[in-house]
Image (cartoon, grey):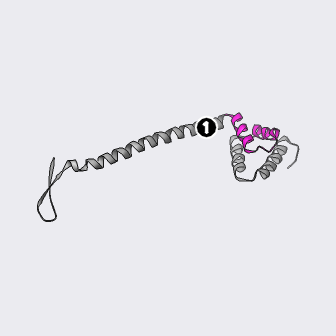
């Protein structure tokens, strides 16, 4: 297909529609890569969503994750805290365990367990 256009010198220039095919090949490769990338991201997002649902629904999962975060604390104390805390409380403790020193987190967990058991008054 020939598309007549006027060039800078005033003469008629003929452009062929086939000259854009190499650019289409590059675009095709980019779109194939993006398609596989989006599939990969969708799978990862699905796995993350399933993980979050398991954490929200399963108290045993929260107990396991809290034990893994605070290995030096007594498992009885961690179990007491996990059984008496809601999901939001667990999430704050989990984030706290990620961001402070493990020895300080152990002390926080032991103090919290004592207060939840009622052995220590506020």
In the image, is 81 to the left or to the right of 120? left
Question: Which residue corresponds to the image point at 76% horizontal and 45% vertical from the top-left?
Answer: 70
Q: Residue sitting at 25 percent across and 50 percent down?
A: 20
Which one is in front, 62 or 26?
26
Residue 68: give x, y in percent of width and height.
72, 41
Q: Residue furthest left?
A: 11
Q: Which residues are magenta?
A: 58-85
Check if residue 80 falls in the magenta segment: yes
Tell me: 119 left or right of 17: right
- Look at the numbered disc 1 and give the secondary structure of its residue: helix
Q: Residue furthest bottom?
A: 9
**For the point 71% across and 50% down, which residue is it?**
96
The number of callouts visible is: 1
Q: Which residue is mark 1?
A: 51
Q: Position of residue 80 (x, y in %)?
A: 80, 38
Give the dominant element type of the magenta stretch: helix, strand or loop.
Answer: helix
Q: Is residue 67 covered in magenta?
A: yes
Residue 38 position, x and y percent, is 45, 42
Quarter residue 113 falls in: top right
Whole-percent x, y for residue 33 in the image: 41, 44
At x 28%, y 48%, the residue is 22
């Amino acid at each position: 297909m020939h598309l007549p256009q006027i060039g800078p010198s005033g003469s008629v220039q003929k452009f062929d529609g086939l000259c854009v095919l190499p650019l289409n090949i590059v675009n095709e490769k980019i779109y194939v890569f993006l398609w596989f990338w989006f599939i990969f991201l969708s799978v990862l997002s699905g796995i993350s969503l399933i993980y979050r649902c398991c954490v929200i629904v399963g108290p045993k999962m929260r107990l396991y994750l809290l034990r893994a975060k605070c290995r030096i604390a007594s498992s009885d104390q961690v179990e007491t805290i996990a059984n008496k805390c809601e999901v939001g409380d667990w999430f704050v403790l989990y984030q706290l365990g990620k961001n402070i020193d493990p020895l300080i987190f152990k002390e926080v967990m032991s103090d919290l367990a004592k207060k939840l058991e009622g052995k220590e008054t506020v």
